[in-house]
Image (spheres, grey):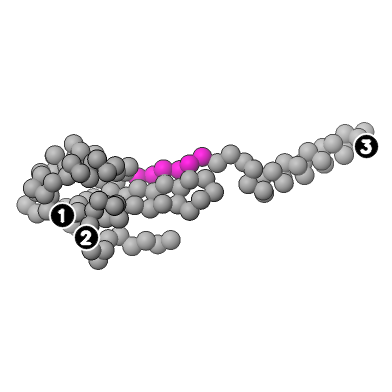
Amino acid sequence: MNFYRQLICFLAVLTMVGCAGGLLHRLDQQQGNLVTERMIELLKPGMNREQVVFIMGQPILKNSFDSDRWDYIYTFAPRSQTPEKRYLTLYFEEGLLTRLVGNYELVEGDSEDAPEDNS
């Protein structure tokens, strides 16, 4: 009887140490719109909204007050590492793409209109 009690205590302690020590398997987490370099290369000023949706898919955020701004946001959190946050904002005028702003390597633009990073 005493042996079983010691065995149960040992297994319980071993389980707690395994959970606390980060030995559990954690999955990589991906959220939002995955935007590839190829997608960005295909975007050209003057494209209409349907052409943009065909290339990029529907945006994760459509501004209710400004229908001429679409935000594509992507977060990748590899296990045990710092999450990577990327965004791409598309601006339209009269239904046509005019500019891109984001933190993807191929996109250049000012960060004044960029969503705030609240990390």
In the rendered structure, the answer to whether residue 33 lies left or right of residue 101 reads: right
The numbered mark, 1 or 3, whose residue comes first in the sequence reads 3
Few, some or many residues within 10 Å of mark 1 (<14, 14–19, 20+): some
Mark 3: secondary structure: helix
Which secondary structure class fits the magenta region best? strand
Few, some or many residues within 10 Å of mark 3 (<14, 14–19, 20+): few
Task: Determine the CA span between mark 1 and mark 3.
Answer: 73 Å
Residue 71 is situated, as x and y percent measured from the top left of the image, at 26, 51
Quarter of the image with the N terminus in it: top right
Label for residue 2?
Answer: 3
Residue 81 is situated, as x and y percent measured from the top left of the image, at 51, 50
Q: Nearer the viewer, residue 23 or 71?
A: 23
Few, some or many residues within 10 Å of mark 2 (<14, 14–19, 20+): few
The residue under label 2 is 109
Mark 2: secondary structure: loop
Q: Hey, what amino acid is under mark 3? A: Asn
Q: Residue at x 10, y 44 (%)?
A: 47
The residue under label 1 is 99
- Discs 2/3, front: 2
Q: Hey, what amino acid is under mark 1? A: Arg
Task: Determine the CA span between mark 2 and mark 1.
Answer: 9 Å
Residue sitting at the far front: 106
